[in-house]
Image (spheres, helix red, strand yellow):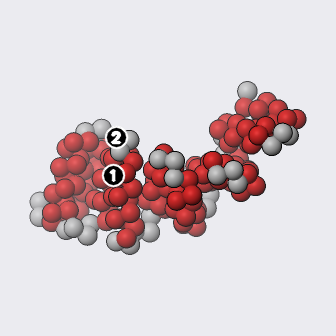
C-alpha cells in the first residue's frame, strides 16, 4: 500500500480507533488530510475521536465538514445530531436525526435520540411517536419506555406513566 494515499492513512486510523489508540489514529488522519484535504472519511473519523473524548464542539465541526464535502452516510448525520444533543442543542439536532432516518429508517437509536430531542423541547407528540418507532424496531428498549413514562407523568397521565414504567422492570 502506498503511504502517499490518503485512504491508506484513513484505513490505518480506523484500525487504531478499533484498538482504542486514539492519538495514533489522529496522527494518521491528519496525515491523510495533508495528502487530501477533501478525504471525507478522515474528517468524519476525527469527529468520532472527538466524540469519544467528549469534545462535542470539535466533533460537530468535523462531522459537518464531512457533510459539507458530500457524505451520504447516515451515521455521520446521526452523530452530528448526537453531539448537538450532548450540548443541549436539541432543536439544532433534529434536522440531522431526520436526515439520518431518511437514509436508514430502521435504526432504533436514531428514532430514540430524535424522540429525546423532541422531549427536551416539550414537543411530546413527536417525542412519543419516535419512542414508539424505537420500540417497534427494538421492543426491549427500556430507555424509550422510561421516557414515555416520564412524558405521561409530566402530562399528569399517571396511569399511563405507571403502565410504561412497569414495562421497564
| Residue 131 in view, yes or no | yes
- 74 relative position to 126: left or right: left
Judge by depth and name the residue closer to the eye, 27 or 116.
116
Q: Using the image, determine if residue 167 lies above or below residue 41.
A: above
| Residue 82 in view, yes or no | no
Between label 2 and label 1, give the one nearer the viewer.
1
Mark 1, residue position: 58
User: Which quarter of the rendering shows the N terminus?
Assistant: bottom left
Q: Sequence order check: which comes first, mark 2 or mark 1?
A: 2
What kind of element bears circle 2? loop
Q: Using the image, determine if residue 168 lies above or below residue 54.
A: above
Judge by depth and name the residue closer to the eye, 115 or 73.
115
Give yes or no for contact between labels 2 and 1 (Cβ–Cβ under 8 Å): yes
What residue appears at the point 15 percent right and 63 percent down from the top-left corner? 34
Q: Which class describes the residues within 10 Å of circle 2: few (<14), some (14-19), or many (20+)?
A: few
What residue appears at the point 60 percent right and 51 percent down from the top-left corner? 117
- Residue 86 is situated, as x and y percent measured from the top left of the image, at 48, 45
Mark 2, residue position: 53
- Residue 40 is situated, as x and y percent measured from the top left of the image, at 31, 65
- 13 relative position to 96: left or right: left
Amino acid at each position: 500500500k502506498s503511504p502517499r494515499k490518503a485512504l491508506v492513512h484513513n484505513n490505518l486510523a480506523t484500525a487504531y480507533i478499533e484498538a482504542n489508540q486514539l492519538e495514533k489514529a489522529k496522527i494518521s488522519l491528519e496525515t491523510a488530510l495533508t495528502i487530501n484535504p477533501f478525504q471525507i472519511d478522515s474528517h468524519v473519523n476525527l469527529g468520532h475521536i472527538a466524540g469519544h473524548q467528549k469534545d462535542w464542539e470539535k466533533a460537530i465541526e468535523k462531522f459537518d465538514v464531512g457533510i459539507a464535502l458530500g457524505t451520504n452516510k447516515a451515521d455521520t448525520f446521526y452523530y452530528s445530531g448526537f453531539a448537538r444533543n450532548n450540548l443541549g442543542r436539541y432543536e439544532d439536532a433534529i434536522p440531522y436525526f431526520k436526515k439520518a432516518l431518511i437514509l436508514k429508517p430502521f435504526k432504533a437509536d436514531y428514532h430514540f435520540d430524535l424522540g429525546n430531542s423532541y422531549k427536551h423541547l416539550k414537543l411530546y407528540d413527536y417525542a412519543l411517536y419516535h419512542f414508539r418507532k424505537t420500540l417497534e424496531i427494538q421492543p426491549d428498549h427500556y430507555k424509550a419506555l422510561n421516557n414515555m413514562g416520564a412524558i405521561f407523568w409530566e402530562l399528569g397521565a399517571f396511569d399511563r406513566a405507571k403502565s410504561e414504567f412497569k414495562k421497564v422492570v
